[in-house]
Image (cartoon, grey):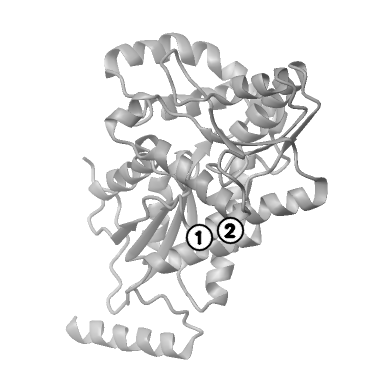
Amino acid sequence: MTPRAEPPYRHGSGPRTALLLVNLGTPDAPTPAALRRYLGEFLWDPRVVEIPRLPWWLILHGIILRTRPAKSAAKYASIWLPEGSPLAVWTQRQTAAVEQVLAQRGHGLLVRHAMRYGKPSIAATLDALRAEGVTRLLVLPLYPQYAAATTASVNDGVMVWAQSARRTPEIRFIAEYPDDPGYIAALAAQLRAHWARDGRAAKTVLSFHGLPERSLALGDPYHCQCLKTARLLGEALGLAEGELLVTFQSRFGRARWLQPYTEPTLRELAAAGVESVDVMCPGFVADCLETLEEIAIECRDAFIQSGGKRFRYLPCLNDDPAWIAALADLAERHLQGWDTRSASDPAGLALQRRSALALGAKD
């Protein structure tokens, strides 16, 4: 593997810490060409599609990348914001907000974001952080529930970069947080506010991203963690067991995926006489194609066409202050043992000066 270009070593420099938020990714534009590039990278990841490489390469390049980009581009165009992709916009805002909260708490660490697929890439972001002198890195995937296809793939991306770096930072990974108190509290507060403002629908559906059913047998805790999040959310709201329905969306291919499926469930509810539903996607912490188009448009149409009267989609946590505080809390717990105090903090400044002097003496 070709070594990456290294920034010059700065003698006497003390440790510097960064927090890296990582989300799935997004195309650069709602166009077939941009979707072809994005899907080619995303769907070639062996963590995402776990079948032998040669037959999958033929399917991917011979069929999927010839037909799917145009359809996906039209869907992205329906939810694209003036500032760009919703996922990119919300992730940028989350990053800036978390950095601000941590700074207010006296931390001087850098907070950046990257996408597993697309831009800004993990490798490019880590190159930039290393150029800024970062020696300690906390990686926080924006997936509360662990899956090999998401969280483990983020770790892969970081470690592939590390393999080509001469000096790697000290690295910590946050693997999962489906039961994080701040995360659950933010979800509960969002539902309470929605019900107080608009009243409660006949049924509340929690739609999580789907995975192939075989992921359970292969060892992913994802399904159980989704159910745990739902259970804790129900308890925080004081609901009886079964008052929150858990479903799974975004099926791909012909294999059996985690069930029950979201859209068929919504059709069944409408056909059974349920006139109103509230739908929330707790596994997505930033609105994206899967929430704004698949749920808020496609699933809404399916529910109404099947006899339903009122469909209400609750936005993701996005930059909700309670969620931003929860992310900052989560980061602080995993930063224990690393000095991250701001240079504007007298104690932190003094410590940094002592560290620099000690390093200078050793050199």
Closer to the camera, 41 or 86?
A: 86
Element under disc 1: helix
Closer to the camera, 122 or 142?
A: 142
What residue type is disc 1 on? Pro
Q: Residue at x 32, y 66 (%)?
A: 135
Q: Residue at x 65, y 30 (%)?
A: 295
Q: How many marks?
A: 2
Give the residue pinned by disc 1: 181
What residue type is disc 2 on? Ala
Instruction: Using the rendered image of the protein, determine whether residue 166 is visible from the camera's viewpoint.
Output: yes
**Proximity of marks 2 and 1: CB atoms separated by less than 8 Å:** yes
Answer with left or right where residue 207 lies relative to residue 130. right
User: Would you place residue 335 above or below residue 247 in this image?
Assistant: below
Image quarter hosting the N terminus: top left
Q: Residue at x 24, y 82 (%)?
A: 359
Q: Position of residue 64 (x, y in %)?
A: 47, 14
Answer with left or right where residue 40 lies relative to residue 323. left
Closer to the camera, 58 or 259?
A: 259
Element under disc 2: helix
The circle drawn on residue 185 is 2
Q: Residues within 10 Å of mark 2 (few under 14, many from 20)?
A: some
User: Would you place residue 180 above or below residue 200 in this image?
Assistant: below
| Quarter residue 334 falls in | bottom left
Q: Residue furthest front?
A: 240
Answer with left or right where residue 320 lies relative to residue 171. right
User: Would you place residue 104 above or below residue 167 in this image?
Assistant: below
- In three-dimensional space, the C-alpha distance between marks 2 and 1, rounded to whole angstroms, equals 6 Å
Q: Position of residue 254 (x, y in %)?
A: 44, 12
